[in-house]
Image (cartoon, grey):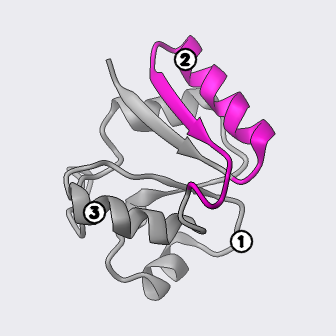
Amino acid sequence: MKKVLVVDDETDIAEVVKQGLELQGIQVDAFNDPQKALQNGFQLYREIMKRDDSTKVLFITAFEESPEEFKKAFPELDTHRFMKKPFTISKLKDRIMQGIVVKGPRQETPED
């Protein structure tokens, strides 16, 4: 069974994603406290990679920037690590189950 950690500063979004993924058979832990998320997703990502660089990470963002703009700002991340809001639980589940969320720093997916 896949296990996912959902971190979002909006309680409702974290809960909807958690419930939706659980209905799809995915085990989910969710946090909405920014302190628990180490203030922002990129800082959290860096801490996760220090501990286990094989952990798969996907950023879901409402920012208007394109994945390429994120790549310029955070060159250690590839564009496959981003998914824009709004999204569907089905699309998120597909990304999780297909392994599109890549492992570790700067590793490319088979689609590249």
Q: Which residues are magenta?
A: 9-36
Q: Quadrant of residue 14?
A: top right
The residue located at (58%, 36%) in the rendering is 30
Q: How far is the residue under mark 1 from the one under mark 3? A: 26 Å
Q: Which residue is mark 3?
A: 49
- The residue lying toward the viewer, choosing from 5 and 85, is 5
Q: Nearer the viewer, mark 2 or mark 1?
A: 2
Residue flagged by tag 2: what amino acid is it?
Glu
The residue located at (52%, 15%) in the rendering is 24
- Give the image location of residue 101, x and y in percent: 35, 48
Secondary-structure class at tag 1 = loop
First reached walking from the N terminus: tag 1 or tag 3: 3
Q: Which residue is mark 2?
A: 22
Residue flagged by tag 3: what amino acid is it?
Met
Residue at the limit of the structure toward the front, as seen here: 35
Q: Which residue is mark 1?
A: 64
- The residue lying toward the viewer, choosing from 110 and 55, is 55
Q: Is residue 14 left or right of residue 109?
A: right
- Give the image location of residue 67, x and y in percent: 51, 70
